[in-house]
Image: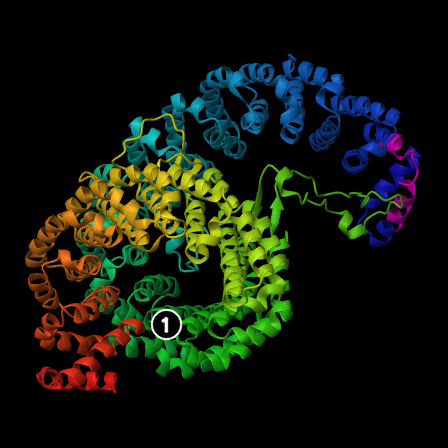
Amino acid sequence: MTEELELILSQLTQPDNAVIQQATVQLKQAFKDPAIIPALCAVMSGSQNPQIRQSAAVMLRLRVKKHWKKINPNDRESLKTVVLQAFMQETEHTVQHSLSQLCAMMVKHETPDRWPDLLQLLNQATKSSNPHDRQVGLLLLNKVMESNPEPFKPHYCQLLQLFTVVLQDLQNPTALYYCILTLTAITAYTGTEEMNVMRSIIPHLIVALKHLIKADQSQASEAMEVFNELMESEVSIIVPHIADIVRLCLEVGSDTTLNDSVRVKALSCIAFLIKLKSKTVLKQKLLTPILQAIFPILIAAPPPGEQDPEDQEDDSGDGADNDNPKHCSAQIIDTMALHMPPEKLFQQLMPMTQTCLASENPYERKGGLMCLAVLAEGCADHIRTKMLSSVLQTVCQSLSDSNQVVRSASLFALGQFSEHLQPEVSKYCAELMPLLLGYLSSLNQAKVGHVTKAFYALENFMENLGADIEPYLPTLMETMLSALNNAESLKIKELAVSAIGAIANAAKELLVPYFPPVIESLKGFLTTTSEEMRSLQTQSLDTLSVLARAIGKDVFSPLAAECVRLGLNLTDTIDDPDLRRCTYSLYSAVSTVSPDCLTPHLPAITTIMLLALKSNEGITAHIEEDKTFVLLDDDDDDDDVEVKDSVEFLEDEPDTDLHDVAGFSVENAYIDEKEDACDALGEIAFSIGAAFQPFLESSFQQVYEMRDFPHEDVRRAAFGAMGQFCRAQHLVWKEIPTEANHQALLKLLDVVLPCFVESVRTEHERQVVMGILETMNNVMKSCKEEAFKNPARLKEISHVIRDVLKKKTVCQDGGGDEADDEEQQAEYDAMLQEFAGEGIPLVASSVPADKFSPFLNDLLPLLMNKTKSSCTVADRSFSVGTIGEILQAFVTAPGGAGVAGRLSNRLLPVLVAGARDSDAEVRNNSVFGLGCLAQAAGPICVTDYPMMLSVFSSMLTKESDLRVIDNLCGALCRMIHSNVDAVPLEQVVPALVGRLPLKEDMDENKTVYSCLAMLYTHSPALVLGLMKPIVAASSQVLGNGKVDQETQSTLALLMRDFAQQHSAAFQAAVSSLPGEQQAALSAALS
């Protein structure tokens, strides 16, 4: 059979399809014969043709992978012997590679101890005096270990001793390469007993990498992954060597004689280190050396006659070419901003940045601007509160720089500022909009690459302007519509379509007059089938979704059904993940405007989205495979073994079980599609309610599967959707209160909430944890006490909040060995704690106060620690704000008065100190908290009234911040409501009425006017004496869209009563008002 098999295999490599088809049929027959295993062994070790030897090895591997149990025991034993013999006598590297993979697959089924010959061979070969044998031995070791790291655990200490020797064999780079890859594979599985050897290996590892870089840069670049692996799994091993690793990476990253890929790898190791271990980097004083090494890379001019990738005219503006050292240097600064305390970073960084900005060299100015741009996200608070006007001034000047490279960088910086430095940046509207509009006026002459950057800045800036965009609308819309109708370039049309979305986000219903021509233009792009217009079509769908949400139900509803049909037609005819993703967002937007239009199409829509979540399309597993030859794989464990279609033959299938694979890459479009499918399913379920019920379970199961997807954005979206499904089920139960609906809700919460709690503790990515905390807060806000029906839940949620506030979770570098410098942390670390803190008042309003009290006793000190004057403004504002909201929750929670009363002695001093803070937001939150304390504790804190009133009265005379004044009014009203007899009304009420109407905090109107209505019953003479100012204030509240209906009704009743019972005084008060206020009042009362 051996010769026959060799002939068939050689026919399979012929370039003739008919021959291949025929050979396939013969092979199918051959595989039914039990003698196939010995025959393949014979071909593998005896054929003269290396390609056929390799094919035989791969077929054996696939046979072993699926049918090891079916191979008879004698054949198994002889296979073990033959494969090792074949391996040692093989001279072709590609065949050795396939043989080593066959061994690795066999070890999966046979533990190493049941194959002593393999261990012996590995031992001999890796220690051989012949350098070639050592290389081959290490190749085999690498493949076997990579696919089976755990079974070899008993041998780790011995292996690590071997590595220590191999790493010193600097003349044999291939051996170094396989040795380092194997070390990388086992790092995650090593334990305490290997620690000491691991520590001693690192210096040798650093030297070995230096040699490998000289010998083979691409192997070195792959081998440097060992640092990332060590940082992630064995931080304590690496801490003593961090300075040396950083030094090596900086040397490699700065060496312009090396190729980009190895420099990029070295620099990305530094970014990864900063992300995981920023405290250690600061503690070991590595910040300055890192900055000194990366700044020259960041400001380097490209070689003469060339441009940086982002400045080249064909740059599409999507930042696809990120793999260059300059980009990596900016990314390191970006990572520092996200993971280090701003004070420490800016102290070192700003002098270097300022030197660059003042330089004569345009590339140095560009570098300075790039540096400012990447700081905006991570250090937003610091820049907003301490240096906004100066950085904006720099950017505005650079917008008119003589050099286009600098102008482009300043546009990028402005776009970043607009995105991250809100709301303050929008206040510079009058200075910035004319500059940006100036860029647009020269749309047709400018180069597309540069226009792309101008649009990026403009969009981000406009998006957050809100109604302030109104004066610019005519110019903006004229420019955009003219670009849609006349621009030559499809890219410019695409930019204009995108900008219309940004304008709509700000303008909302102000855009209604422009809606018909916009829709007219979009229609042409939406229905196109041409490939070159795909990107414009996708953008048009995106903008259509924005318009649906922004323009108002009345205007958009007539188009809703047509939009759904459009989406379904597009996904039927065009197979493109980006296009599908945009249809999901469109359905989602339609569900908020006109849910009924979506209901009939739910079966089709949910099917497409669930398929997108299930699909492995675009996912490539990093399984090393030689895909050049024929493979034979028998499908399932059925006896009728069939050979796959010969076309599929030519490619090995990657394993679809992602968890077994060392690593894999996913095409971005497919990640985005999964993320958007999760978001859309969650929102559609919530908007549609009962009609979504038939699809809830299948959607939930598929989304739940995505919670450990390798890409963080998909995980975050999956958790978000799980929260939305709970809120959707809660709404359905409220609408249709059957026992079945209630049980379905409780069952869902019992799966989702424990999953959230566990993931907050174990998830590595901070952004994902923030997303989970936010969605958990939304679930508590919607489901209230239902979320706590399970008796274990209160403790679980309270404890996980406590752990985040104590920085004990994995993503907070929890349990780190460094003592934490409490006062200073990265802004995003503080923000993560804020998301956790926001959960405390939500728990307080969902359970009886006495039950929550013991947990609150644990949490309060953690909040009060952040109220100290040495803490950042953001921390002080967050902590007193949260205390205020907890007290507000106790106003309505059963038993709240008692708990609030018991806490008043602890909280009063903190809130009074906060009311005297230098920052208006801290004062505002403290005043709110004091009012809520009085309201919640009721009679218990009457003894504190005189002190509180004196604080408020001195504030009313001095305070200039309008929002704080509004909250002072609210707080006084809460005190009056709670204990009317404890307040000297004659002094307080006139002072209060004198501050009306409220200017900023419209929510407090409800508190104020319900108090005045109560006083009208309690002390009518006092209120009537103030009729004139009360009527004047009311004329600005009635009919004001920003004030809730309930408050307006309360107020209208009061006015009608004045008009009926005290008509002369009322008429006099009305007639003293300006005409438009009189009209507003009579309209509201009629």
Q: Main secondary structure of the magenta part?
A: helix
The magenta span reads 22-40
Q: Does the magenta-highlighted stretch encompass residue 80? A: no
Placement of 401 over or under 270, stated as above or below: below
Q: Secondary structure at mark 1?
A: helix
Q: Position of residue 905 (x, y in %)?
A: 20, 41
Classify 10 Å Cα crowding around label 1: few (below 14), some (14-19), many (20 and above).
many
Residue in front for this viewpoint, 47 or 782: 782
Instruction: Tell me the quadrant of the picture where the C terminus can be found.
Output: bottom left
Report the residue that reaches farthest toward the top. Answer: 129
Q: Is residue 257 visible?
A: no
Q: Which residue is mark 1?
A: 504
- Give the quarter of the image for residue 627: top right
Residue 461 shows in the view: yes
Q: Residue at x 72, y 18 (%)?
A: 113
Q: Which image quadrant: the N terminus?
A: top right
- Left or right: 961 in relation to 521: left
- The part of the image, by quadrant, that contains residue 1071 is bottom left
Q: Position of residue 996 (x, y in %)?
A: 14, 69
- Foreground of the two, 1070 or 476: 1070
**What is the x, y in percent for residue 71?**
86, 32
Q: How many marks?
A: 1
Q: Is residue 177 above or below residue 655?
A: above
User: Residue at left 85%, top 34%?
Assistant: 70
Q: Nearer the viewer, residue 776 or 792?
A: 792
